[in-house]
Image (cartoon, rainbow, N blue to C red):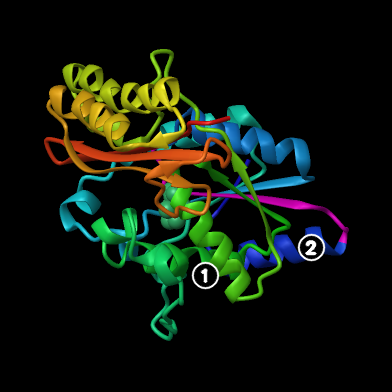
């Protein structure tokens, strides 16, 4: 695997591959890689000639400075995992490569996606995500961008950003990869003690309870039961919502449309999110 740190080197490599007509898949990450990320690399390898992964812990998307400072960094292990998965190029830029002094900061008109759920609880987060992915896509001109369903709202946000900026990139969303017991894989899981990891299962269990017990009609009681599963385990809930696939809240189900359950909850300063299709 080639490891490139300079934007100019990566652009030269990509121009060369493009001239040869090669199809390029791109997996942007913030490192601390796990099997969820590797599933994206595998998908990209199946569908493209070249797979590029980036690792950049983007400061502009952290609304909480402590979360940024404590974000796990495991670069040697990341490189091993990427090598083993057969990734072709790792882009490992410095802060200056991504945000040079002349960087032009813009605002993305994301509409309600910016103010609901994650947008509401992490003000500015999605503007930062758009900023970095827009910049990365300017450097890594790719055919397909690979994202994980665990960050469902992020997938919708980036789809919108790509439309707004007319970037002409296709997004492939890969299913959430879970531990055997159901806990969604996340870089932040490494900040949990063994005991907290067990408690964190409540998030998966709450989503499973939505899926198991969903019935047409009023959803208030179903939601309350799911919320209790989380608070009984000692996690503090930011939100537990049931929405349609465009993230419009649904309080009364007609038994027809597809629904998704979404949760954000934290323990001891570690904030986890998860979601699940609960009707199909
Ligand atoms: O999902 C992530 O890891 C990040 O938000 C992303 C897409 C790599 C942008 O920094």
> Which mark, by number, is residue 16?
2
Is 156 displayed left or right of 143 in the figure?
left
Q: Nearer the viewer, mark 1 or mark 2?
A: 1
Residue 5 shows up from this direction: no
Q: Is residue 259 above or below residue 232?
A: below
Q: Residues within 10 Å of mark 1 (few under 14, many from 20)?
A: some
**The N terminus sits in image quarter:** top right
Residue 227 shows up from this direction: yes
Q: How far is mark 1 from mark 2, CA to CA?
A: 20 Å
Q: Earlier in the sequence, mark 1 or mark 2?
A: 2
**What residue lies at 43% left-to-right and 82% top-to-bottom?**
106
**What residue lies at 33% left-to-right and 62% top-to-bottom?**
125
Which residue position is annotated with label 1? 135
Asked if residue 23 lies in the magenta stretch, the reply is yes
Closer to the camera, 199 or 58?
Answer: 199
> Which mark, by number, is residue 148?
none
Range of magenta residues: 20-32
Q: Residues within 10 Å of mark 2 (few under 14, many from 20)?
A: few
Is 232 displayed left or right of 107 in the figure?
left
Residue 280 occupies quadrant: top right
């Amino acid at each position: 695997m080639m490891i490139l740190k300079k934007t100019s080197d990566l652009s030269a490599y990509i121009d060369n591959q493009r001239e040869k007509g090669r199809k390029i898949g791109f997996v942007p990450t913030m490192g601390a890689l796990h099997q969820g990320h590797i599933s994206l690399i595998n998908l990209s390898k199946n569908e493209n000639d070249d797979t590029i992964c980036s690792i950049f812990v983007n400061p502009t998307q952290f609304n909480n400075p402590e979360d940024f400072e404590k974000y796990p960094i495991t670069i040697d292990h990341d490189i091993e995992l990427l090598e083993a998965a057969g990734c072709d190029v790792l882009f490992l830029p410095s802060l200056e490569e991504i945000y040079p002094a002349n960087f032009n900061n813009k605002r993305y008109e994301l509409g309600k996606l910016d103010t609901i759920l994650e947008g509401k609880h992490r003000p500015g987060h999605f503007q930062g995500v758009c900023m970095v992915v827009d910049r990365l896509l300017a450097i890594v001109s790719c055919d397909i961008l690979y994202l994980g369903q665990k960050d469902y709202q992020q997938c919708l946000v980036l789809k919108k950003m790509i439309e707004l900026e007319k970037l002409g990139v296709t997004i492939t969303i890969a299913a959430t990869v879970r531990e055997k017991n159901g806990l969604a894989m996340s870089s932040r899981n490494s900040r949990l003690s063994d005991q907290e990891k067990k408690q964190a299962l409540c998030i998966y269990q709450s989503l499973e309870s939505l899926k198991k017990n969903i019935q047409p009609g009023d959803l208030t009681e179903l939601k309350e039961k799911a919320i209790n599963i989380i608070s009984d385990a000692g996690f503090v809930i930011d939100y537990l919502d049931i929405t349609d696939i465009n993230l419009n809240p649904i309080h009364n189900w007609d038994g027809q449309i597809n629904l998704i359950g979404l949760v954000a909850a934290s323990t001891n300063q570690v904030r986890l999110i998860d979601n699940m299709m609960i009707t199909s």
